[in-house]
Amino acid sequence: MNCIIEIPAGTSKKIELDKTSKKFAVDVRNGKERIIEYLPYPGNYGFIASTYSNRDEGGDGDPLDVLVLCESLKTGTILETKPIAMLRLLDNGEEDFKVICIPSDRKLQTVSAETFTEFSEKYPSAIEIIEMWFINYNPSDRVKIIGWSDEKEALLEIQKLSIPLKN
């Protein structure tokens, strides 16, 4: 599946794709650029192309979020990835799932796990870091961890939220 990177790993600026202009820009709230005043993003953050989390069904009104575990990638990178897990969160009462992926290209992989079982066995502290980061990076949000799902459930969520192509 293709992912679009908005925020490179190691970045503290909250960069988003503007739905109107189709350009990447630092998100602005209350007239100020959003800068994460916590540790920088622990992976490349963006979204899964052609997905939508419907507000009417408990979603956040955005494409499905993705965290790609590899070296830092530039904003705007489109990358083929494989899901290995999904972190299920409630963010201010809205479902906000994060699909955890690795690049399909083995040369870009820094994590050698293709399943959630492998990931949790080889990198248990990475799971803790990801959880802690999402719980703490934005002190104004009330975030609750619902739990983790494996790569199969992540694929089902991606299929469920996929926007059908128009003929």
Image (cartoon, helix red, strand yellow):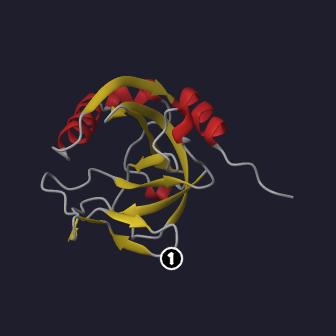
- The amino acid type, in three-letter code, at marker 1 is Ser
Residue 18 visible from this viewpoint: yes
Q: Mark 1 = which residue?
A: 21
Q: Is residue 143 above or below residue 76?
A: above
Q: Residue at x 26, y 54 (%)?
A: 41
| Residue in front for this viewpoint, 14 or 100 | 14
Q: Position of residue 136 (x, y in %)?
A: 17, 40
Q: Position of residue 28 (x, y in %)?
A: 28, 67
Q: Position of residue 155 (x, y in %)?
A: 60, 35
Q: Is residue 26 above or below residue 129?
A: below
Question: What is the secondary structure assignment of the residue under circle 1?
Answer: loop
| Residue in front for this viewpoint, 117 or 49 | 49
Q: Residue at x 45, y 43 (%)?
A: 60
| Residue in front for this viewpoint, 82 or 23 | 23
Q: Residue at x 26, y 40 (%)?
A: 134
Q: Position of residue 30 (x, y in %)?
A: 22, 64
Q: Which image quarter holds the C terminus?
A: bottom right
Image quadrant assignment for residue 166:
bottom right
